[in-house]
Image: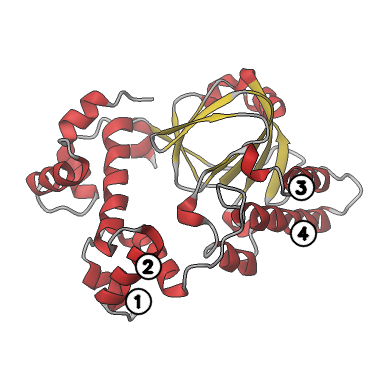
Amino acid sequence: MANERQNGIRPVHYTPPEGVSGTVEALSVRELLARAGPAEFTGTQRLSFDVLIRVTEGVATHTVDFTEYALQPGDVLWMRTGQVHQWGDLTAYDATVVMFITDAVFASTHEALRSTVAAGRNHWAASALAPTGLERAFRHVVDLASNPVLRPDLRDLATRHALAATLVELAATEPGGELPQAVPPDAFVWFRELIESDFHQTRQVAAYAERLGYSSRTLNRLAHEWTGLSAKELIDERVVLEAKRALVHTDLPVAAIAEELGFDDPSNFSSYFTHRAGITPGRFREQCPRG
């Protein structure tokens, strides 16, 4: 954590303000800016909690892992734990902001979400959400989170249920506004989760297959079916993303980045990155300015 701070990616943890209890907090961008101050929203951050933003007025820009989103009223952005992001101009818009720690999501909700959220999508356009009840759902979370009548433990429980309903409704909405016709099987979901936890240690499909108790052929079939990529390409995609984060947002030498990503030789890492990103690590660092 200290190394990240020194090298350009600032870890941000959720600490509720005095008088606020529970695992979910809802407020407006203006309230958030007034409470924390402009300096809190500068530079590149890696969150240890999730943030939902629903723009209510103005136009926002927000960058999540090298993708810049131009947010219009009604748009929703979901930043997930561990993602690297940069805030835009918080004075240019207002929005409902819901912050929650991982434990705020019930286990049953998490099980449902993990098979419906397509490839960890971050952005939903207002046009796709118009037929849904997302505005009402967000308002319900805000109302419960700030309810002064409910006992704190009951307020937190009610807010978590409202959050669960909001996330499920959001996750079930496809970009075109249609509900998905099917959900990925558990084996594929488990594979994606294992990549997230193990990509620093191994890049071999066979190792993941052995851990999961499936064949490499099965993982490849599922990967192609649900993403159009091979199992190896999914693993490589995650490794390259983390490499890009380190190259752009830190001053770590390429050799140190290679070591953190499990490469025994910097030249092997450079060849690996160049082959998959189409550019050398050094050149990528030069061409992609730090946010």
112, 84: nearer the viewer = 112
Name above or below for residue 160 compared with residue 144: below
Element type where label 4 sits in the image = helix
Spatial separation of the CA atoms under disc 1 and disc 3? 37 Å
Q: Residue at x 26, y 46 (%)?
A: 240
Q: Amino acid at mark 1?
A: Leu
Categorize mark 1 by other alpha carbons within 10 Å: few (<14), some (14-19), many (20+).
some
Identify which residue, 250 or 239, lies in the foreground.
239
Quick one: label 2 or label 1, which is nearer the N terminus? 2
Residue 182 higher or lower than 228, as above or below: below
Identify the mark nearer the N-term, 3 or 2: 3
Q: Position of residue 152 (x, y in %)?
A: 82, 53
Residue identified by numbered label 3: 141
Residue at left 35%, top 76%? 212
Q: Nearer the viewer, mark 1 or mark 4?
A: 1
Query: Label 2, on which residue?
Result: 191
**Gap between marks 2 and 1, in whole Å?**
7 Å
User: For the point 37% across and 67% down, which residue is it?
Assistant: 191
Cα distance, mark 3 to mark 2? Answer: 32 Å
Q: Quadrant of the C terminus?
A: top left
Q: Where does residue 218 sit, x and y in percent of width and height?
A: 31, 76
Q: Which mark is residue 212?
A: 1
Determine whether label 2 and label 1 are within 8 Å by CB. Answer: yes
In primary-sequence order, the first of circles 4 and 2 is: 4
Asked if disc 1 and disc 4 are in contact, CB closer than 8 Å, the reply is: no
Dot 3 amino acid type = Val
Q: Which residue is mark 4?
A: 157
Going from N to C along the chain, the mark reached first, 1 or 3, is 3
